[in-house]
Image (spheres, rainbow, N blue to C red):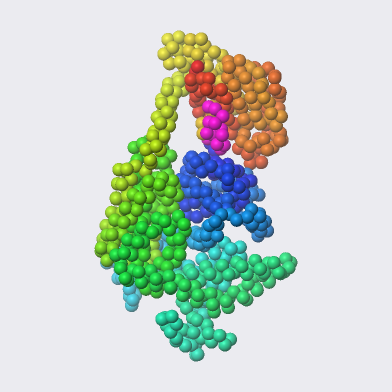
Amino acid sequence: MATSPAESIVDAVGGPGNIESLTHCATRLRFQLRDASNVDPSTVEAIPGVMGAVPQAGDRFQVVIGGAVQNVYNDINALPAMSGTGGGAVDEDDMDSVKARERAKGPRGKVAWLDSLFEFLSDSFRPILGALLGASLFITFMALMATLGVIPAWNAPGVTLEPSWQFVNLMWQCVFIFLPLMVAYNAAKKVGADPWVGFAIMAVVMLPGFTGLADQEGAQQITFLGSDITTISVFGMPLTIFDYSSQVFPPLLMAGALGLLWKGLRKVIPENIQLIFVPFLAMLIMIPLTAFLIGPIGVYAGAGLANLLSSINDFSPFIFAIVIPLAYPFMVPLGLHWPINAIMLLNIQTLGYDFIQGPMGAWNFACFGATAGVLWISWRARDKQMRQTATGALAAGLLGGISEPSLYGIHLRFKRIYPRMLVGCLVGGLIIGIGGGVRTQAFVFTSLLTIPAFDSVVLYGIAVLASFVVAMALVIISDYRTPEQRAEFEAQRDKAEATAQAAAPVVAAATATAASGSSTAAPAETRRGTATATLDKPGATDEVSAAFEIASPLDGTAVALSEVPDPVFGGGVMGPGVAIEPTGNTVVSPGAGTVAAAQPTGHAFGLELDNGVELLIHVGIDTVNLKGEGFEVHVKAGDRVEQGTPLVTFDRAVIEKAGYPLITPVIVLNGDAFATVDPVGLGATTAGSPLLILEK
């Protein structure tokens, strides 16, 4: 059985012991590592299914997966080796020790606080992206029905829909009305407080009874900072009554204050009564603080930012439509788009429409167009890995409106893409600006599926199409790689293809002979013509063909060496060969020779065969950590062995319980001495059957 991407990723970031915690966003695995200094991004990016790797400050490391991130995250947490590590959920005590160790390391970098802020914003929204995306598609459906005349303008003032369509409308309203509660839960969890306490604090100001206070006797209408608001005296203090539906700044500010308070209460309250009094005192302090101070500050902070952007748009929609798509390519990698998303929601609540998402669509589709250009080039260049990355990123973008797989998986790795993508952003922004701007009456993800939600659909459609086509065309014309990068890739590709073509006849003939069960040497004419003689005994030589075979050292399934979840073995650093996923439990000598090295732990053996092959057999990966437990060694260095001589017997249960892969690399250490070293064939194999064919 081949190594899974989950196992490969864990090994590539330093193994389970190097992982303190693991979360994920819509497209990325987010690792907090104990030491990220030795993690090689290129090794991670070479893993099938990985679109990109992003090192960050403070031993943080992100792995871009795309739409399958939830499945890979679950697979990683299900690995036996992850049991008891920080890879899954971390309890409070463990988290305290983790943070203490991080503080002991000293400053994480000049912008570590900025990383933490953006991570707080990201993790506050990340878990609800699915709900937001689902709601945006409901909104798009309603907009499409209104455009087709099936229903009246569904969100126009005074319009009443029939009950059936009202019910459909509720399917998206449920997400946005209660968005503050979702954000409060996630943000409180992020800062280490009880998320349900954060939820409860925010829920107070969203109760019908809270908004109903505005109708009580004594409520006053006043003007504050140019806005008409309602206040009422509560315990002699003015309480401002707002509709907190869809607000996100108040729960974010509330969670930040709650996190500080929660930590302080845990320090001063004895452990045996913390369960009761920490939540009680936190609610006692935070509910009034949120209602009287933090909530209004959050509302006005959000309104202030929204008014600033609105003023720029009112002053010149043309300039605004150009600036937004040109700014977003730099804002998204930094995480600055999260506050803008909050302003979009606020615009819809206060104005009834948003003017930011339209120009933002020009950036998104320019991003996706650049990715399409990369896909086109990778297809023509026969670059399988980039083709896979670009395909996943393009699907995530066009169908989900998610740009991160394109950015982190491709664009930030190849700097030639950004200038060309910015031209696409500029063209789309110019079209929107000349057309007078684009609005939407609901928060949606800018994808192909949500185009009908924008007004005007025609102007928006032309703009995003132009952005996509221009960025794609420029990338295709100029390539996304430098001439040096292109030449290096083509040289590696041509070498790999030439090697595969040269080995094909050898592997095919040897596989056919092995399948027929024949042990008779082929005629001399055939051997001279193809150099594929199959000999009576693996390990013997032939003077005519100078080709010979190495037998399999154990029962199992032969797989490509690249399947080994170790960059040294899998990358061919030790030499060429093959790997075996064992079904048996005894490793035997694949030929006659001498034991050059026999590790007392039983995990590795070096053999010098009589035919001149220096062979390494490594039983499992990282099994040296078992210190010999589960291994019974039968030979020692200097022993003479024949084909079939037992080298070691291992206990599968012990190795599997410890969480180490059983895959066994069989490496030709002196591979440079041979013209070719190729597997006879991949698939089921037995000890003593042909495994490798070598040609001098």
Give the vertical position of 397 relative to 493 (above or below).
below
* Towards the viewer: 397 or 324: 324
In the visual, does 173 lie left or right of 359? right
Say which quadrant the N terminus sits in. top right
Residue name at image x 56 percent, y 33 percent: 569
Q: Position of residue 455 (x, y in %)?
A: 30, 65
Question: Is residue 614 among the parts visible in the rendering?
Answer: yes
Is 170 within the magenta? no
Residue name at image x 33 percent, y 45 percent: 475
Q: Position of residue 675 (x, y in %)?
A: 48, 20
Is 571 within the magenta? yes
Dividing the picture into quarters, in which one does residue 489 lie? top left
Question: Is residue 455 among the parts visible in the rendering?
Answer: no
Magenta highlight: main SS: loop
* Towards the viewer: 504 or 320: 320
Q: Which residues are magenta?
A: 563-576
Residue name at image x 61 percent, y 63 percent: 192
In the visual, does 688 lie left or right of 296? right
